[in-house]
Image (cartoon, grey):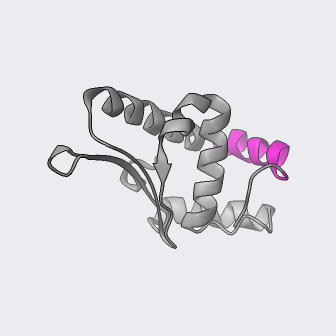
Amino acid sequence: MYDESIKLIEMPEHDSISVCVYCENDDLFALGERINEKYEDAYMNGYNWDALIRFYVGQQAPELMDEIGTDPEAGMFSAYMNYSPENLEKMKRFETHVRQMLANEARLMAFIDANLDDIEWD
């Protein structure tokens, strides 16, 4: 559903691999508004997507979050690593976790509800 909102970008010529989440794409923006309606602290700009994604992936695969850097902006979240075949596989796993997080809205809302006070909202 959010295929256009999430991109794995390989740039070996720049020694970089990124997973970008474009928060202002229509479907993801609408999801962010629904999250914010239910949870006042969760205004879903890039910074709060960063908080949610880092927390979610950290719960699922903490070893990934020990190695992956993040860079949120107002309308985008980006995770990154230096380019290598091993890191490319890690970033593919990271992307899979993000997609799984977004795959079921009811499950995502239940996750946020259960962890609301532990997520470091902006």
| Span of residues in magenta | 105-117
Who's the residue at 63% across and 37% down the image?
58
Q: Position of residue 99 (x, y in %)?
A: 50, 40
Who's the residue at 63% across and 30% down the image?
60
Pick the front one: 104 or 80: 80
Q: Position of residue 112 (x, y in %)?
A: 76, 48
Who's the residue at 78% across and 42% down the image?
110
- The image quadrant where one finds the C terminus is bottom right
Left or right of residue 52: residue 46? left
| Residue 116 within the segment the image draws in magenta | yes
* Secondary structure mostly taken by the magenta-highlighted segment of the chain: helix
Q: Position of residue 9 (x, y in %)?
A: 28, 48
- Residue 20, can we see it? yes
Left or right of residue 93: residue 47? right
Indicate the quadrant where residue 81 lies: top left
Pick the front one: 80 or 102: 80
In this rendering, is residue 29 above or below 8?
below
In this rendering, is residue 2 above or below 49?
above
Who's the residue at 59% across and 58% down the image?
49
Left or right of residue 7: residue 62? right
Pick the front one: 114 or 77: 77
Indicate the quadrant where residue 5 lies: bottom left
Indicate the quadrant where residue 31 lies: bottom right
